[in-house]
Image (cartoon, rainbow, N blue to C red):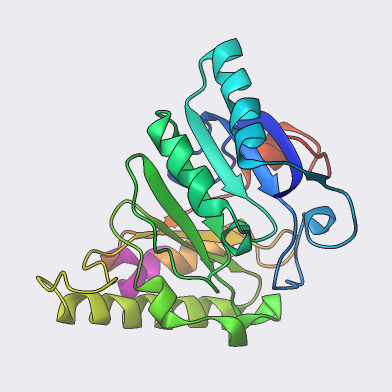
Amino acid sequence: MKVSEIFKSIEGEGIRMGQAAVFVRLHGCNLRCSYCDSMYAVEGNDFKTMSVDEVLAAVEAYRNESGVKCVTLTGGEPLLHSGVEELLTKLSESGFLVNVETNGTVPCKWQLPGLFYTMDWKCKSSGMSSKMKMENMETLGAQDVLKFVVGSVEDLDEAEKVVAALSQIKSSRNGDTAGNVATSMPCIFISPVYGKLSNEYIVNWMITSKVMTANNARFQVQLHKIVWNPDMRGV
């Protein structure tokens, strides 16, 4: 596996925000988002090739040192890597609680104890909206997260339409457990693109949106960029 970095920090976003976790950042991605803040894990040769067992050993070392049980697998796009199923299985079997951060282009097909997914829907300002597939969002369940990073009014409108459509799909399939479609809505998070729409504008929009309110959408900022320098790596 191509590994960009492994480090311990706090979860900066999502349902584990502020909680200590070990981050495994894999190198390589099939998207080029306009606001990407980890291009070093997308292009170039800034990575180390490691086996699944070597990655597991590095994560185990952090647990032995400090007792941390939460792991976040990120990228790049981690679900594109060969060996990722083996890694997720071994992390789960070892008792780790794993969050997979994924970009919305790959279905979340593995369901393991302690595993959940944080999936992006890339809105128009990312330049990657055309790559999104609703069927991938349908694989998310109540334990998972669907995240929208928004940088324009158009992005807000797009996020609202996606949540409304997904909610309708889930409702129509309630009680149907066939296939790879979860029937519960994931947790919805809205994040700002730094320097674009103000936090106040996004929050005022969110709390007046019937769709977002009905689906318990939450506003978030990138906490790690408040604690440390926004450009710092390894945090």
In the image, residue 235 above or below residue 179: above
Closest to the observer, 167 or 151: 167
- Magenta-highlighted residues: 207-213
Residue at (13%, 74%) from the top-left corner? 176
Residue at (32%, 51%) from the top-left corner? 143
Q: Which quadrant of the structure image shows residue 52?
A: top right
In the image, residue 85 above or below residue 179: above
In this view, the residue farthest toward the bottom is 130
Residue 131: x and y in percent read 60, 83
Q: Is residue 127 left or right of residue 218?
A: right
Residue 133: x and y in percent read 48, 82
Closest to the observer, 177 or 94: 94
Residue 205: x and y in percent read 47, 69
Question: Which quadrant is the C terminus positioned in?
Answer: top right
Q: Is residue 161 left or right of residue 203?
A: left
In this view, the residue farthest toward the left is 175
Is 73 contained in the magenta span? Answer: no
Closest to the observer, 162 or 74: 74
In the image, residue 201 above or below residue 71: below
Residue at (66%, 27%) from the top-left corner? 58
Principal SS element in the magenta part?
Answer: helix
